[in-house]
Amino acid sequence: MDAALIVLAVGILFGGMVLMLVMGYQSTERERALQAGARETAAAAPPASVVTVPGFFANPAAASQPFNILFDDALVNRIEHHVRLEQAVVAQFVHHPSIDNLYRESGASVHIH
């Protein structure tokens, strides 16, 4: 009878400790969720420095309207030419590695393969 009473007491003690751990875990997770929600709300709100900008500096209606970006063909061609020249320099360095090929002069001629 005494052994059954001890087992029952240990079982109640162990069950109470597990219950306290579970309840502590749930309260911690609830606080984390509240803090995450507060961080998301703070991140969604614009900073005070943006809110205080006078209307003649920033037009809120203009920011919400989508604008079209037109590519200048000459600029695209110039960028492509520059990339091809850089690719030729890298290819030349890969085939013939040396300090001269790595750091070439800006006036040096580069041949595209």
Image: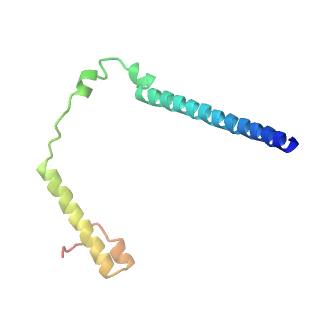
Q: Is residue 51 visible?
A: yes
Quarter of the image with the N terminus in it: top right
Query: Measured along the vertical axis of the image, is residue 77 above or below residue 7?
Result: below
Residue 81 in percent (x, y) is at: 18, 62
Residue found 16% across the figure and 53% down from its top:
76
Residue found 31% across the figure and 69% down from its top:
105
Residue 104 in percent (x, y) is at: 32, 71
Residue 45 in percent (x, y) is at: 42, 25
Pick whichever, 101 or 72, lies toward us: 72
Residue found 64% across the figure and 37% down from its top:
22
Pick whichever, 37 or 111, lies toward us: 37
Query: Measured along the vertical axis of the image, is residue 100 above or below residue 53?
Result: below
Query: Measured along the vertical axis of the image, is residue 40 above or below residue 74?
Result: above
Quadrant assignment, res 108 = bottom left
Residue 13 in percent (x, y) is at: 77, 37
Query: Measured along the vertical axis of the image, is residue 38 above or below residue 76?
Result: above
- 18 to the left or right of 88: right
